[in-house]
Amino acid sequence: MDEDAEQEGLSVLRGKPVGGWGLLQIAGGTGLAAYTVWALVLMPGFRRVPLKLQVPYMPASSKQVSNVMTLLKGRSGKMVDLGSGDGRIVLEAAKRGFHPALGYELNPWLVRLSYIYAWRAAYHSRVSYRREDLWKVKLNDCSNISIFLAPSVLSLLESKLLAELPDEARVVAGRFPLPTWTPSAVIGEGIDRAWAYDIQSVREAVGGTHRGSDV
Ligand SMILES: C[S@@+](CC[C@H](N)C(=O)[O-])C[C@H]1O[C@@H](n2cnc3c(N)ncnc32)[C@H](O)[C@@H]1O
Ligand SMILES: *[C@@H]1O[C@H](CO)[C@@H](O)[C@H](O)[C@H]1NC(C)=O
């Protein structure tokens, strides 16, 4: 177990001289069991992320992946997936020629799994997965971006993207659109829908007042 998961385990089990499963049994029905499973297994790495910014893992379908790729067609160079899960979008981007193809993912198990998939596809040297908090990563040198997150965090993400991205950046959002931006392109239906935003047009629409500094 790595350091973070261990700390989480300790904080969950603090002061209880029982093993994990014993605690689960004692706690049965109180909700603590569910919390423990969630904290230890599903959300390791998230201890320092405020609760309202925590987005659970939910992998994109192959249709969603292909819609994201369609909206990034014609672009090349560096591609970044914010919250990369098991790395499926990054891997597909690498296969389509993006280099480097980079994913930020806080969950260490998903980072490991991503490398296993990349290895199996013989693309391990073309992808990179970093266990970093996407809210702390500076995006000033990113211009081909995909996001598959939850609606609760998207308006905060709008501010971050507007402040940091270069004008030529394109952001592709899957499943949920960015709440106040006007997309340049939309494809797919229902849950497979994806939206593309060109930052220059978004800045023009909001009056250019949100232009960030280059720090
Ligand atoms: C809905 S899943 C999408 C996974 C992947 N992009 C895909 O489409 O299959 C969102 C992912 O973002 C990760 N995530 C959420 N908040 C994060 C943060 N602050 N920093 C890094 N990763 C985060 C979650 O662990 C989860 O794997
Ligand atoms: C993103 O794609 C554009 C268009 O192909 C390319 O010019 C740019 O260099 C890419 N961005 C990065 C950071 O590589």
Image (tube, helix red, strand yellow):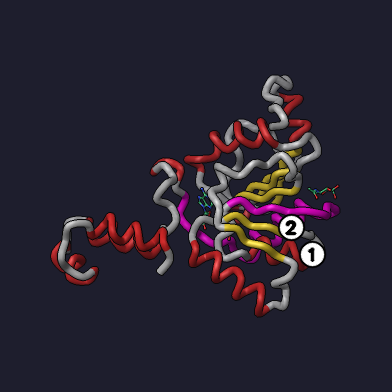
In terms of sequence position, does the residue under pointer 2 or pointer 1 come before the other?
2
User: Where does the N terminus fall, quadrant-wise?
Assistant: bottom left
Q: Is residue 164 left or right of residue 133?
A: right
Question: Which residue occupies the foreground of this view, 4 or 117?
Answer: 4
The amino acid sitting under disc 2 is: Met
Which residue was labeled with disc 1? 96
Where 51 sits versus 37, above or below? above
- Quadrant for the C terminus, please: top right
Residue hosting label 2? 69
Q: Position of residue 77 (x, y in %)?
A: 82, 54
**Which residue sits furthest right?**
74
Residue with the most extreme front position: 3
Q: Residues within 10 Å of mark 1 (few under 14, many from 20)?
A: some
Task: Name the residue: 61% across, 35% down.
Answer: 160
Quick one: label 2, few (<14), some, or many (20+) residues within 10 Å? some
Q: Is residue 185 visible?
A: no
Would you identify the image quadrant in which residue 26 lies?
bottom left
Looking at this view, is 129 or 207 the one in front? 129
Of residues 103 and 16, the one nearer the viewer is 16
Q: Label 1, secondary structure: give it.
A: loop
CB under 8 Å between callouts 2 and 1? yes
Q: Residue at x 60, y 31 (%)?
A: 159
Front of the two marks 2 and 1:
1
Whether 80 is among the magenta residues is yes
Q: Is residue 13 above or below residue 141?
A: below
Q: Is residue 154 magenta?
A: no
Is residue 139 toward the left or the right of residue 32 in the image? right
Residue 210 in which image quadrant: top right
- Please state the horizontal and vertical placement of residue 170, each as a whole percent of the image: 75, 43
Rendered position, 83 above or below 1: above
Specify the segment rendered in magenta.
55-82
Label 1 lies in ligand 2 vicinity (Cβ under 8 Å): no
